């Protein structure tokens, strides 16, 4: 099912502050979209608005071209998984899952046998076979998560909305369930929207990332685009650790205002003026000088993980992280270079990326 | 040593304060033998008092359970102006002396009261009649269901209800299949507290009842009449019966917890 959200606005109760500020988002059928952003960016608010759990001041939401006006329109078509699972504690796992079918009006309700079969299918699909008679209190976090997912899927919705579903799980279960969720999405042909504050999770599982900030969509792109061409400094910062250097652009050269950092060539079409260069620590290079007296920047090793040596580079004013990929067994504990090379960085002015067109 | 003394003191206090009264009541009732005390229960006025108590209790429990559920739902699931005031007001019957609330009913419905004469002309008797007794009991037992449900429903939050709504459940389905079954222990507890209180209410009922034997005397009032008339055995027999009924309600209240522990052990 495709979802089309147009100019959605939601005000905070009794104020003019906008929780959702003119949000427009088109999610084609079968897409897996991740909504990311810091706390308070409006991710959950947007998700709840799509589900019909919250009212919005203006704007429209269409599902497969049909306007959704209230919760009743969405019941059964949209599966929602809550952050804390929100399972019914007094019902068995099987009754939890079949709830959406049990509450159907008599004439639409499947027979008991059909419901039992459906529950069994879902239990198998969720790798919960044999758990049907247990109560939620007896399950582990990962199992509860899957029961919540099974319950959301019982009525055969085309859309699956997940509100930080992995928040309470430990890293191993998290990773496993993440991959498995993606498989499930493809297998069932769902349209999925996932809210998460974990950008890595989003990059791994979704085909599209929607970055939100202060109730607005800042960028809506594929993980690769987001990585290569972040629209704003915020997006760049949000997606991973960055080091930023302030400086000046003139005649196709960015000159950092700090000593110990090499100027770098940029497109000549860029307008001259102050700019900020942002770069990931693993993109920083070391430029060796001619003689010993030129080894102005010292780097000290502080950690080694997954093939990377983590150094802190001592610039005159501050210390910045530099990650160097090291195929050898031993990384040197001390390095020195003349200047840091920041050729691979991205340029921003007033928080917006500079593009040479 | 100190610990043992403390334990001892606690137990002595418990026995004296909690266990002694019912024991004394039962002993007094059985002073002339079981048959004699059972014979006093055959008194028609006594039977009428027992019936009136049971009727009043049923009415109070049904009414206050329904209203209590509604009030608790409103107070916990919605935020509206005046909510805090309403929460405090629900507790008024607990803080006001029952005698005072009885007097209020008299003021409203008595022969010299605000609405009393008009209702009297219409043939409706409230003061010194059964409706008055029921109104007084209703008022006094109002807070119990609300007060036991509110903390639990507050803790429930809205998530499960929203999940139910998204699965397609309507208002009543949510209330009857999700919210209340989940809160059933708290609800049960509130209902039994209401029952115990409704059976034992004396003050408010005493003011509005008029003490007409066989007509407007509930068990507590009848006990007082018997006692004042030096019918000690009858008074204490009735008292023992009332105490047993109330204690049964209180013990039932702890049944769900005991049952849960039993199931835990079985597993």
Image: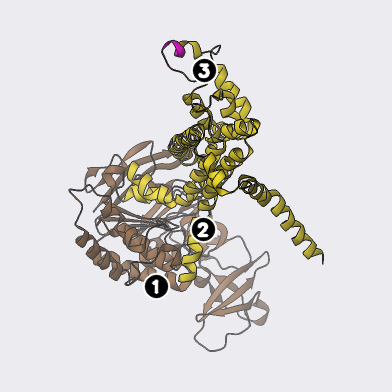
What residue sits right under mark 3 in the picture? B109
Determine whether A237 is above or below B36 in the image: below
Which numbered marker is on residue A115? none
Q: Nearer the viewer, residue B200 or B33?
A: B33
Q: Give coordinates of residue B83: x percent, y percent.
A: 53, 33
Q: Chain of mark 3?
A: B
Q: Which residue is mark 1?
A: A176
User: Chain A, which colour?
Assistant: brown
Tell me residue A318's x, y (percent).
66, 65
Q: Chain of mark 2?
A: B
Q: Nearer the viewer, residue A84 or B130?
A: B130
Which residue bears the numbered disc 2? B257
SS at badge 1: helix
Asked whether residue B122 is drawn in magenta, I would say yes
* Side of A28 relative to A286 (left or right): left
Q: CA distance from mark 1 to mark 3?
A: 71 Å
In this picture, which residue range is highlighted in magenta? B119-124
């Amino acid at each position: 099912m495709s979802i089309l959200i147009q100019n959605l606005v939601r005000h905070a109760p009794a104020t003019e502050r906008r929780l959702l500020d003119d949000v427009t988002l088109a999610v084609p059928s079968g897409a897996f979209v991740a909504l990311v952003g810091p706390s308070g960016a409006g991710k959950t608010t947007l998700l709840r608005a799509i589900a019909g759990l919250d009212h919005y001041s203006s704007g429209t939401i269409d599902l497969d071209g049909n306007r959704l006006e209230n919760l009743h329109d969405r019941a059964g078509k949209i599966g929602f998984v809550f952050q804390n699972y929100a399972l019914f504690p007094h019902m068995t796992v099987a009754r939890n899952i079949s709830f959406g079918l049990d509450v159907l009006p008599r004439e639409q309700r499947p027979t008991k046998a059909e419901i039992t079969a459906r529950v069994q299918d879902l239990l198998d699909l969720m790798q919960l076979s044999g758990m049907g008679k247990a109560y939620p209190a007896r399950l582990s976090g990962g199992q509860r998560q899957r029961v919540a997912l099974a319950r959301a899927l019982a009525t055969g919705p085309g859309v699956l909305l997940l509100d930080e579903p992995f928040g309470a799980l430990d890293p191993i279960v998290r990773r496993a369930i993440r991959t498995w969720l993606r498989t499930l999405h493809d297998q069932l042909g769902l349209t999925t929207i996932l809210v998460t504050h974990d950008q890595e999770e989003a990059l791994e599982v979704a085909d599209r990332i929607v970055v939100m900030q202060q109730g607005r969509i800042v960028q809506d792109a594929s993980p690769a685009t987001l990585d290569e061409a972040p629209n704003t400094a915020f997006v760049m910062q949000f997606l991973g650790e960055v080091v930023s250097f302030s400086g000046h652009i003139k005649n196709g050269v960015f000159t950092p205002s700090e000593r110990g950092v090499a100027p770098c060539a940029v497109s000549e079409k860029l307008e001259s003026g102050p700019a900020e260069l942002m770069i990931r620590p693993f993109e920083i290079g070391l430029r060796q000088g001619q003689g010993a007296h030129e080894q102005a920047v010292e780097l000290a090793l502080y950690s080694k993980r997954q093939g990377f040596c983590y150094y802190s580079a001592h610039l005159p004013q501050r210390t910045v992280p530099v990650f160097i990929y090291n195929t050898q067994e031993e990384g040197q504990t001390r390095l020195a270079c003349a200047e840091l090379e920041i050729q691979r960085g991205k340029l921003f002015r007033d928080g917006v990326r500079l593009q040479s067109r | 040593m100190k610990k043992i003394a403390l334990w001892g003191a606690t137990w002595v206090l418990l026995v004296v304060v909690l266990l002694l009264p019912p024991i004394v009541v039962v002993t007094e009732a059985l002073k002339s033998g079981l048959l004699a005390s059972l014979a006093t229960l055959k008194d028609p006025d006594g039977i009428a008092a027992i019936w009136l108590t049971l009727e009043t209790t049923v009415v109070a429990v049904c009414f206050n359970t329904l209203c209590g559920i509604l009030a608790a739902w409103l107070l916990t699931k919605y935020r509206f102006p005046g909510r805090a005031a309403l929460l405090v007001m629900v507790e008024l019957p607990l803080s006001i002396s029952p005698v005072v609330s009885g007097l209020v009913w008299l003021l409203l419905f008595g022969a010299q009261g605000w609405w009393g004469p008009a209702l009297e002309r219409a043939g409706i008797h409230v003061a010194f009649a059964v409706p008055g007794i029921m109104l007084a009991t209703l008022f006094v037992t109002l807070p119990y269901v609300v007060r036991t449900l509110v903390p639990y429903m507050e803790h429930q939050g809205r998530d499960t209800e929203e999940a139910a709504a998204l699965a397609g459940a309507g208002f009543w389905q949510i209330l009857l299949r999700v919210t209340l079954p989940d809160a059933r222990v708290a609800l049960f507890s509130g209902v039994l507290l209401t029952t115990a209180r409704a059976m034992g209410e004396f003050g408010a009922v005493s003011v509005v009842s008029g003490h007409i034997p066989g007509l407007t005397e509930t068990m507590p009032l009848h006990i007082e009449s018997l006692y004042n008339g030096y019918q000690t055995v009858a008074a204490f027999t009735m008292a023992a019966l009332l105490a047993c009924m109330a204690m049964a309600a209180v013990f039932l209240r702890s049944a769900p917890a005991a049952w849960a522990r039993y199931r835990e052990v079985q597993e």
